[in-house]
Amino acid sequence: MDEQTPDPREPEHVIGFGGTHHATPAEIRAELPAGLRKEFEAEYAAALDAARDDGDLQPLAKMLGPWQAEVRMRRSPDWPETEETLRKLRAGLPVDTVPADQVERGGP
């Protein structure tokens, strides 16, 4: 196998569960507000149906990742401020900004 050909044994996406980064479907369901929960449930049911029908778990893995990120974001202590900024952006209102070179970068 040359360097350009991906190894089919390597996962395209991994389904992670547990810890702070990989909320389970039950945790996602419990932590989302009603409107988002309904959207999650529809996407989750469709992904489970597809997995059952064709045996491919990739759509399920791809679908869960963004929802896990949503829950991770909502678990952040900064979530109330983030939610307010998102509300303003969606409404077309001005938001406070910080030049990128003044943002403190954390972690590796």
Image (spheres, rainbow, N blue to C red):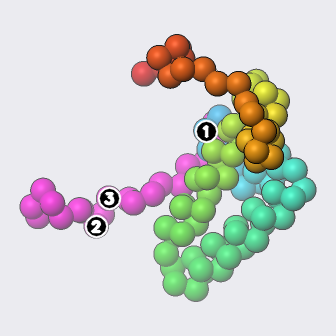
Quarter holding the N terminus is: bottom left
Q: Which residue is mark 2?
A: 8
Is the C-beta separation of discs 3 and 2 under 8 Å? Answer: yes
Could you tell me which residue is drawn at 82 percent across and 30 percent down? Answer: 80
First in sequence: mark 3 or mark 1?
A: 3
Q: CA distance from mark 3 to mark 1?
A: 21 Å
Name the spot of residue 59 as percent of width and height, x first: 54, 69
Name the spot of residue 8 as percent of width and height, x first: 28, 67
Is residue 14 in the magenta section?
yes
Question: What label sits on residue 21 in the rendered view?
Answer: 1
Q: Secondary structure at mark 1?
A: loop
Quarter holding the C terminus is: top left
Q: CA distance from mark 3 to mark 2?
A: 5 Å
First in sequence: mark 1 or mark 2?
A: 2
Q: Which residue is mark 3?
A: 10
Could you tell me which residue is drawn at 84 percent across and 64 percent down? Answer: 38
State whether residue 106 is above or below residue 34.
above
Residue type marked 1: His
Residue type marked 3: Glu
Name the spot of residue 69 as percent of width and height, x first: 63, 44
Q: Secondary structure at mark 3?
A: loop
Magenta highlight: main SS:
loop
Visible residue check, residue 27: no
Considering depth in this image, is 36 or 87 the residue closer to the camera? 87
In this picture, residue 5 sits left or right of residue 30: left
* Span highlighted in magenta in the image: 1-19
Q: CA distance from mark 1 to mark 2?
A: 26 Å
In this picture, residue 83 sits left or right of residue 16: right
Quadrant of res 78: top right
Is the C-beta separation of discs 1 and 2 under 8 Å? Answer: no
Is residue 104 in the magenta section?
no
